[in-house]
Every structure is written in C-alpha cells, then in structure tokens.
Image (tube, rainbow, N blue to C red):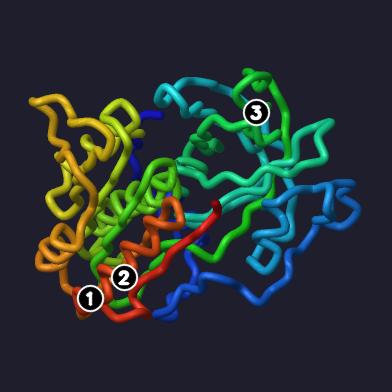
Amino acid sequence: MEIMTLGGPGIKLALRGLRLKHTGIIRFLSTAPPKLEAQSGLPNGGLGAGKHLQFTAKHSRLPVIVKAVVTDVRLESPTVRGITLQIDNPQFNFKAGQWVDMFIPGMETVGGFSMYSAPSQLIETGTIDLGIKFSKWPPVFWIHTQCKVGSTVALRVGGDFYYAPEVGDHPFDLLLVAGGVGVNPLASMYFHARTLHKLYLENKEEYCPGKVLLLYSAKTYEDILYKTLLDAISSFHPGIEVKYFTTREPPPHASNATYGHITQDVLRSSLKTLDTSALQTFVCGPPPMIENIKDHLLVCGLSQNKIFYEKWW
C-alpha cells in the first residue's frame, strides 16, 4: 500500500459520511445483535460458523454483506500475510479500528480480521488491506495456503472499537498501544489520524486532531509490521509519532526500536507528552498484555473511561 494523497471536496464529503457522532465513550461491547443481510445465504452464527461469530455476537455490524476480490497477496513479515481486497459496493464502509466477518466459499467457519488500512483508502481506491498472522484456524490457514489474486470472498463490517471523530468535536490526543498483530486496528487509526490532519490543514473548519502516539511492541525487529508506512507519516507530521519495542531479541543497533516491554515507566513518560485531560487510549494485543497495560495506565492516573481495548484471543 502506498501513502495516499488526499484532496478535493469529494473525498471530504465521503469522509464525513464515515464519521459517527462522538459521545465521549466508545463501547467495548455493543448491546445490538448482529444484523444479517436478508436472504444472504451465509452462515448466521451457529456453532459451525466458529469462534469469531460467537465472540463478537453482541458487537454492532453493518446490515450488508458484499463481494470482495483479492487483488494482491504479499508477506508483511515472516509470519504475517497481507492481502488487498477490492470492493465495488458503495454501501460498504468502515471506521478506523473496525473489522470484517469474512465468508470464504466452501468453508463454514467465518473469519474475522481487522483492517489496517485507513477508511480514506477505501474511498480513493475501493480497496482495504488486511494483515493475517499464520495459524491453523481454517480461515487463516486458507489465506496463507490457498488465497491468491482473483480469489473471491464475502465481507461484512463490524465492531465497536474505533476512532471516528467528526467536525465539531473537541480535539483530543490519542495514545495507541499495540502488541503483535494487534497493531492492525491501531494502524488504521494512525493512518486515519494522518488523513484528518491533512484535511484540517486544507480547511480549518474540519476536525482538528490532537497529538497521536503509537507504542508498538513486537517479538523481534523483523516482526514489526507496516514500519515503512508508519515511519513515513511520523517523519512528515510532527504531531504523529511511533515508538517501537522488541521483546524477544534486541533490534539492530542503528534502528529506532527499544529492546524491552512497554512498561509502566514507558507509559508514564508517554502520558507526560500528551494532554491527559483530553485523551483517548486504545489498546490491542494478547489479553495478558492488555491487562498489564490497562493496570499500568490506571496506576499512572488515567481514568478507566479513557481506556478502550479489544480482545480477540
């Protein structure tokens, strides 16, 4: 995926169409049941559909299922395969941080994967990007062993974990804390923040984003995903920053990564650079990491209603 250049009234109007009124609290679990497109002929969440639909049964979903065609398959890291999907349906849209149900032909188990691309990419090119780490779970195994350019799947957007400020909202800073492939929804938020910054520079009536800081932990330096894209945005926008951490082995000497975990001291020093009176913190990664980060943030004085997280594992 390339860094996008945005502009023009069409893009701005389309982006406004993706925004949801900010209420100050983003729900971790929705009380709304999933909605299925009428007569879709697709699984409805029974036992055979698999764990993803069961785990997310109470999350919000868009009431539309669309066809998607794979247009690119690549390795993002030794264990993560990236795919680009083309969607030619104007009813399909998503907010930064959301995921898709993936219905694979001939497979009863339904996949669930977070977009790492920004909503603006869908508007500009009609595509979304996914990054999927290898496992034997049937949908993932299919992506790693059978999925190819031209493969067709069906997608439905869902999720209540998202970053979607709109015009008129008070600016707030954003702290993103990612572990492993948990970076996917947070990368989408990071890229969306870049879009919002650019729109605001072009028109001061647009939403004015605050500072954005992404703390991203991976096992090794080669496991860091989307680094070229993340670094390019950080170098161009002084209000958007990323810091990397490796936990299994030291990074290369000349790299900009730190060897070690995202500790309480790291979080405390990071919070000092942000406006905690107007802050939202999103955390995504393995459950033990999420619990540790949440506890550290609370000890650092951050209130519970400023911490949002998503657990999939």
Mark 2 and mark 1 residues within 8 Å of each other at the beta carbon: yes
Question: Quadrant of residue 209 in the image?
Answer: bottom left
Characterize the local packing of mark 2: few (<14), some (14-19) or many (20 or more) Cα atoms within 10 angstroms: some
User: Which residue is disc 2 drawn over?
Assistant: 295
Q: Earlier in the sequence, mark 2 or mark 3?
A: 3
Residue 113 is situated, as x and y percent measured from the top left of the image, at 57, 44
Q: Quadrant of residue 87?
A: top right
Tag on residue 112?
Answer: none
Determine whether 85 is above or below 75 in the image: below
Pointers 2 and 3 in contact (C-beta within 8 Å): no
The answer to whether residue 310 is left or right of residue 254 is right
Residue 253 appears left or right of 117: left
Q: Given the image, on which type of amino acid does mark 1 rest? A: Val
Q: Residue at x 54, y 22 (%)?
A: 72
Q: Which is closer to the viewer, label 3 or label 1?
A: 1
208 versus 77 height, above or below: below
For label 3, the residue is 141
How far apart marks 3 and 1 lie (CA) works out to: 40 Å
The structure residue drawn at horizontal position 26% and vertical position 68%, both measured from the top left corner, is 296
**Residue nearer the viewer, 18 or 57:** 57
Q: Position of residue 107 (x, y in %)?
A: 81, 34
